[in-house]
Amino acid sequence: MAGVGVRLNRIFSKNTITTNLIGFGYSTMISIAPMVVVIGAVITMQYFLGFSKIGYAQRELYSCTLLYIFIFSLLTASPFNAVLSRYLSDVIYNETYEDILPCYYLGLIMNLILSALLGVPFCVHEYFAGGVDIVFIFAGYCGYMALVQVFYSMLYLSICKDYKKISLFFLIGMVFAVVLAFVLVKLFRVELTLAMLISMDAGFLLIGSLEFALIKSYFRENSGKYKEVLKYYKKYWQLVVTNLLYTAGLYVHNFVFWTTEQRMVVANSFVCNTNYDMASCLAMFTNITATVIFISRVEMQFHGRYRRYSEAVIGGRGIDIETAKKRMFRQLGEELMNLVRIQFIISVVAYLLCIVLLPQFGFGGLILRIYPCLAVGYFILFTMYAAIIFLYYFNDLIGAVLTSSVFFVTTLVCSIFATDLSEIWYGIGLVAGAFAGWSVAYYRLRVMEKNLDIHIFCNGNLMKRGKGIKPNNKVYDNGETIIAKKKKSVSKDDKAAAKRAARKAKILAKRAAEKNKQEAKQATKKTKEKRREG
């Protein structure tokens, strides 16, 4: 992500209020703009097409369909993204760009197959148990599969640093969706919720197509090395577990409260808890700027220190390596503290605005009683994720697995416990889980700081690993058998050496005899010549 850091450094280097605002806007655009654009499109369609005037059951069916599309497309993509990101980083580092298309195709096929297998049974249940129109079900299923492709392709464009084009594609797709919704409703008189769902499907499909076309324009060659991609799943299984558990932990507290008496069941298939889900959404948006701050700070500050340490390890002196390491970890601690400090101020301001303004728009009562605890939970959660990213920097994959596992399990257990508490403590499960995960991640970072030299310099292998028969691990024995084997091997070696010596002596003797014979002939010739002269 160094390319973003260069751009942000140019913006913030002028150190004025205007450039700071521009830098913050740019950071926002490259991180959360797609989500904001989608929400804006949904609100626009609902407001101008009279969504509030249709029946309550239709509104909830549409809302739940859209909710499930987003949640489960993210969940099904989570096992693939982290491993493929690692593979792509290695490919780009090795400059073997022809290996990217095999990775893209294979990952996309696996992601679509998994998503389809999970989505079909639900759609069948929705049709038979809920009695929903099959056209509406098919539209929802198409939107789900299209969004899976969108999220998957975003990974490749993010690694290529094309954040602006991702945001542009989302803007184009959602503008197209809004226009299509107006055309379907006003001109073709299509039922409102079905028209809005079809329009969202078309928008997602357009975004996915634009992303696919851009990827194909970047990478034209295909090496056909599909097996190499599969090997990465075996080698870096920790990334699969970490990303899956982290993504599941984001929603597991919602799933727990979907089982309480406050839940709402739509079409005998969709389950949700409107008050808790809305409070979760507000809490997430209260702290979403943490993502922007983290990207900006890591791109601008920590990445440079990390690069200088890596360069020192490759060709620097011992004192240079130690100095670079201390500076790097000092910067890491400062970035985490700055993230907490800045985000705390923003969260407090956003919290006060929500408490004051939301009741005027109809959001109050139970939602605002649940909201404070969840806001604290998401505040700690985004800080924990920043620590996981730092663990990735140091290749501490076991630490990342432990962090996400503790986060998921603690959130699940404490959320179950919180269902019996009063409304103000409903979010305590997320708070406890995020804090437990953060504690594990921070501990692993401290351990890594103390043992980084061992991790860097003592983690290799003297011999190349391979498959075959494992040699005997016995290296010494006092028994006579080993001595006899050694003597036997020595005697065999002596015989072979004696044969080689005999051959060599025979050749030398033959050469000496020929030499003596030639010398004798020459001496005879000289003697004869002298006699003739005398």
Image (tube, rainbow, N blue to C red):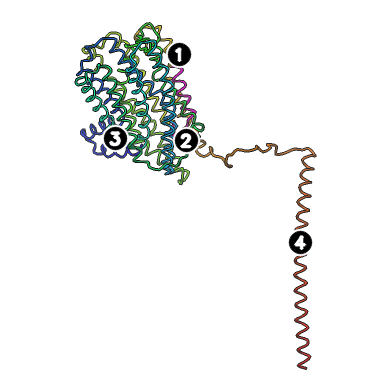
Residue type of the residue flagged with mark 4: Arg
Please state which of the two labelled residues, at mark 2 or mark 4, is closer to the viewer. Answer: 2
Q: Amino acid at mark 1?
A: Val
Asked if residue 202 is positioned above or below residue 2 in the image, the reply reads: above
Measure the C-alpha gap from mark 2 to mark 4: 57 Å
Q: Identify residue for label 2.
A: 229
Give the mark nearer the N terminus: 2 vs 1: 2
Q: Nearer the viewer, residue 193 or 127?
A: 127
Compare marks 4 and 3 and give the one earlier in the sequence.
3
Classify 10 Å Cα crowding around label 4: few (below 14), some (14-19), many (20 and above).
Answer: few
The magenta region covers 392-410
Q: Is residue 371 magenta?
A: no
Q: Position of residue 141 (x, y in %)?
A: 36, 21
Query: Do the CB atoms of the residues marked 4 and 1 lie less than 8 Å apart?
Result: no
Q: Which residue is mark 1?
A: 413
Write down the quadrant of residue 160 in the picture.
top left
Q: Which residue is mark 3?
A: 165
Answer few, some or many: residues within 10 Å of disc 1's Cα (few below 14, many 20 plus, some between 14 and 19): some
Left or right of residue 216, residue 521 in this image: right
Foreground disc of the pair 2, 1 = 2
Instruction: Tell me whether circle 3 and circle 1 mark residues in contact (CB < 8 Å).
Output: no
